[in-house]
Image: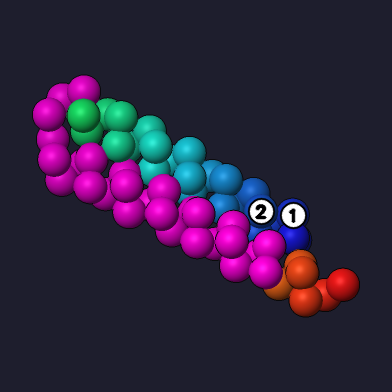
Amino acid sequence: MSSNEKGRAKAEQAKGKLKETAGRAVGNERLTAEGRTEAAKGDARQAKEKIKDMFKR
């Protein structure tokens, strides 16, 4: 996994979790949903990079 993409995936996951937690804390459903979406994007990006690494070997 390229370090740049790996870092981007981790950052996106963390940002999403933070947004989701903040949304829950203040009772904002939209912010919670945005956080879940960002975390899912980070998960997908990380999975994509892992698959790319498998085929490089």
Q: Quadrant of residue 46?
A: bottom right
Q: Residue at coordinates 39% horizontally, 37% vertically from top-left?
A: 17
Which residues make up the magenta segment? 25-51
Q: Amino acid at mark 2?
A: Lys
The N terminus is located in which quarter?
Answer: bottom right
Say which element carries label 2.
Answer: helix
Q: Residues within 10 Å of mark 1 (few under 14, many from 20)?
A: few
Q: Residue at coordinates 58% horizontally, 53% vertically from top-left?
A: 8
Say which element carries label 1.
Answer: helix
The C terminus is located in which quarter?
Answer: bottom right
Q: Is residue 35 left or right of residue 41?
A: left
Residues marked 2 and 1 touching at CB (< 8 Å):
yes
Does 50 appear in magenta? Answer: yes
Q: Residues within 10 Å of mark 2 (few under 14, many from 20)?
A: some
Does 22 appear in magenta? Answer: no
Indicate whether 53 appears above or below 11.
below
Q: Residue at coordinates 41% horizontally, 54% vertically from top-left?
A: 40
Across and down, in percent, residue 3 comes to: 74, 54
Q: Residue at coordinates 77% horizontally, 76% vertically from top-left?
A: 55
Q: Amino acid at mark 1?
A: Ser
State the residue position of label 2.
Answer: 6
Indicate whether 1 appears above or below 16.
below
State the residue position of label 1.
Answer: 3
Across and down, in percent, residue 33 comes to: 23, 47
